[in-house]
Image: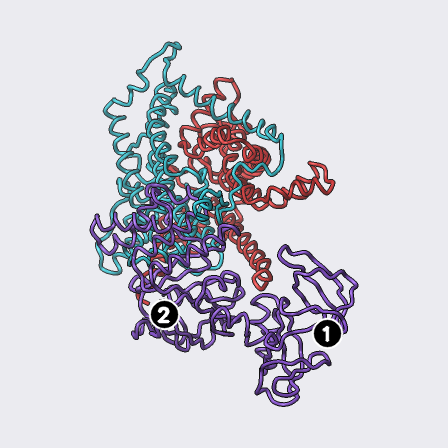
Chain colours: A purple, B cyan, C red
Amino acid sequence: MTDNKLINLVNITKSFGDNIVLDDLNLYIRENEFVTLLGPSGCGKTTTLRIIGGFENPDKGQVIFEGKDITKTAPNERQVNTVFQKYALFNHLTVAENIAFGLKIKKKSKEYIKDKIKYALKLVNLDGFENRMPDSLSGGQQQRIAIARAIVNEPKVLLLDEPLGALDLKLRQDMQYELIRLKNELGITFVYVTHDQEEALTMSDTIVVMNQGYIQQIGTPEDIYNEPQNAFVADFIGESNIIPSIMVEDRLVNILGANFACVDAGFGHNKPVDVVIRPEDIDLVKPEEGIIKGMVTSLLFKGVHYEMEVQAHGYDWLVHSTDLVPVGSEVGIRVDPFNIQIMNKPESEDEEAVELEI
Amino acid sequence: MKIRNALNVKTPKPPSQKNEGSSLGIRNVKWLSFPYILWMVGFIIIPLIVILYYGLTTDDKSFTLDNIGAILHPINLKALRIALEQSLISTLICLLLAYPLAMILSKSKMKSNSFIVMIIILPMWMNFLLRTIAWQNLLERTGIINIVLKFFGLPILNIINTPKAIILGMVYNFLPFMVLPIYNVLIKIDKDIINAARDLGANSVQTFLKIILPLSLPGVVSGITMVFVPSLTTFVISNILGGSKIVLIGNVIEQQFRIGNWHIGSGLSLVLMIFILISMAVLSKYDKESEGSGLW
Amino acid sequence: MVKRFFERFYVGLILLFLYAPIIILIILSFNGSKSRAKWGGFTLKWYKALFQNQSIMNALYATLIIAILSAFIATIIGTAAAIAINSMKKTPRTIMVAITNIPMLNADIVTGISLMLLFVALKYTLGFSSVLISHITFNIPYVILSVMPKLKQLNPHTYEAALDLGASPVYAFFKVILPDIFPGVLTGFFLAFTLSLDDFVITHFTKGPEIHTLSTKIYTEVRKGIKPEIYALSTLMFVTVLLLLIIINRKNAEKKEPDKKV
């Protein structure tokens, strides 16, 4: 990964009718990066992708590609290729003709095209499928053809719009590995749109969490998961306990009346904050050993762990643990200081709305 | 080799919601088709056999090919030739007029496409004979079109009672049958298919030639048959706008029946059916899955 | 912008082409002169005369009754057939669809002649009933074509769900399936009605000397000159349909409005 800004979106605003989809969005994508735009439906992630691809024109703002303004450039003149949500394969053409489409337009030689088709089909593990028709293929196979069709053009950036959305779980997981491998083999930039947080966490170098037309947080998967910047991100990525609390002083937070040690500082004295604690970071101990006491109210077996709810100090704590604690048991709750994530309370009404929405 | 295994997994096709052979969960409903089957045998199949019988026999019920051979009579042959010429020309004109129209309509941001369909078929609610007769008024030497042409100092149009007037009548009457199937195919093309072509570097002309045109072919073929067959077999339009000077094969057949020559009339109808069968065969080749639902 | 202008201009031109004869006919219905070539001042007399013209009114009744009856019967037979065809396996289904296509793709003149020959061969007197049978014949396929797509969209499990909840098959059909496919049934009915109303060729061959529909009546007058009452009548019919369609469209628009906001 280099620090070159390959794509730079500057002050992008886009609305459809009265509906503002993107509001003054700024985002840059570095060369050779796997960037995922993650968010619930309607958050503007697909629109952002389509603006990069050239299928939508922003109302305001610029799209800069390698330092040049391409805001008004037609899609066919951009060095970007797209893998569409429902694949958008040309059903009247064979697999080979689909893959050759862009190359024929560029008037490449027959041998070159033939080699490229072979290479691309090998890359997506579909050797020998040249003469099949797209509608005779399974969803996963169509998906691969759509990717092959895009990458033979050697784009600088590959845009992928929820490409795995239509596949079943097993196939989706396999394709995730496949995409990472492809990305590494091709050495190009991937911009990936999804609403599936697991997909995003698995594949990305950088995740851009979006909601209601705003970017909520940009960071590595670890950053996003471990240090969500606001309640929306915390809630959207994985499961978590988000508890209104008071920051007593640096490195000490009062959660539901009990003081917990934490590692954050600089929030001020006695400031209201939100605390995020992941369910797997809560340790259930003997009642007398816990910082606060509670009672297990529900228990579900989830395969790798048990999911429990513990009622303590008027809050239902969601806890994941490999140890079984029967319903009705008295337990103590402990959290390691570095597992307590402190977030500022939302300041504007807008951000408040974001939270309520979830 | 997870992936290899995954390739063998049959995944459901993504968006297409086709319930192939879905029975609505109703079993034993085949009897519901019995009235229809009876009706179709009685009033479609048997009549065609009757016409075949008449076409291949004489008055004294003996077998003959003369009725079909009657097509070789110079007058009949000429009528067939003119009908073929005129219907091919009008089909072509309809196609040239309809395709751009369908393109424009399919792109329009009009909310309901039922409105567009309505506008195209609304004229059919006025009796087609009357509408054709109205063209006499429009085309007459002192008709409205010529008044307008004169006003702009243009040469006047003198096509009433000529083959051109018949072609105009055919185009007028059958244009909606060309527009609607093409329009219906065009609006069904996924926008992302077109975006994909653009994304892969095709300009708008290339996108049209390589993607839109081939994908709209079923609609075009269906439109061609729906215009060609009625144009080829009409006797009314030629009667009204051709001033009985121009005789098409339809006129010949109608005349044969009027004067009681049923055997020759049937024989010529059989010849006509050969042409219809050819266009049906062409249609079914392109119209594999839509089951003829191209028009509505 | 220039492109948009040309597009609009083109659509306008085609619409003018399609609607010019209709405008002419409407103008003629108000023409004081009996001749089509002359403008004899504005008059409403043809509208009055229309209702006193027994032969036109008879033709109108015959046309309407045949259209309603044939559309109604075709809708019942066609809907039933569509349900059955939809549940068939591939081969019988293909055969049924092919047969359904015959009257639609075949030339009207051949359909008309073949039916006439059948009636004559059976020594069945040509008249009202032979026209009705013929119209039902060419209407059924259009009903099937309208209902079929709706059946395909239907969730196959709703019917099973109804049965599961204790409904009898007949009750389940009327309460679950029919409401879902009803728009298609309705389209089929109106399509059939329209086609029957507008048909000339098939009626021409199967009607016999006793009755006239509007189409055949107009055809007999092409040479002698059309009675202006006919223009008045078709103007009335056209305007009625136009108003009906506008009302239906409004209703649909109203119905759709709340949906959109969800």
Q: Which quadrant of the figure contains the C terminus of chain A? A: bottom right
> Is the residue B196 above or below the residue A4 in the image?
above
In screen coordinates, is B31 left or right of C207? right
Q: How many marks?
A: 2
**Chain letter of the residue beneath label 2 in the structure image:** A
In screen coordinates, is C207 left or right of A350? left
**Most foreground residue, C190 or A9:** A9
**Residue B62 falls in image quadrant:** top left
What residue do we see at 70% from left, 63% from top? A308
**Chain letter of the residue beneath label 1 in the structure image:** A
Q: Are marks 1 and 2 in contact (CB under 8 Å)?
A: no
Per the image, the residue denoted by label 1 is: A290
What residue do we see at 41% from left, 17% from top? B53
Per the image, the residue denoted by label 2 is: A1
x%, y% of residue C88?
A: 54, 31
Q: Amino acid at mark 2?
A: Met
x%, y% of residue C60?
A: 53, 40
> Is the residue A319 above or below the residue B89 in the image?
below
Q: Secondary structure at mark 1?
A: loop
What residue do we see at 58% from left, 44% from top? C154
Mark 1 crowd level (few <14, some 14–19, many ≥20, 10 Å Cα): some
Q: Amino acid at mark 1?
A: Gly
- Residue A257 in sight from this viewpoint: yes
* Mark 1 or mark 2, earlier in chain: 2
**Most foreground residue, C108 or A274:** A274
**Most foreground residue, A229 or C257:** A229
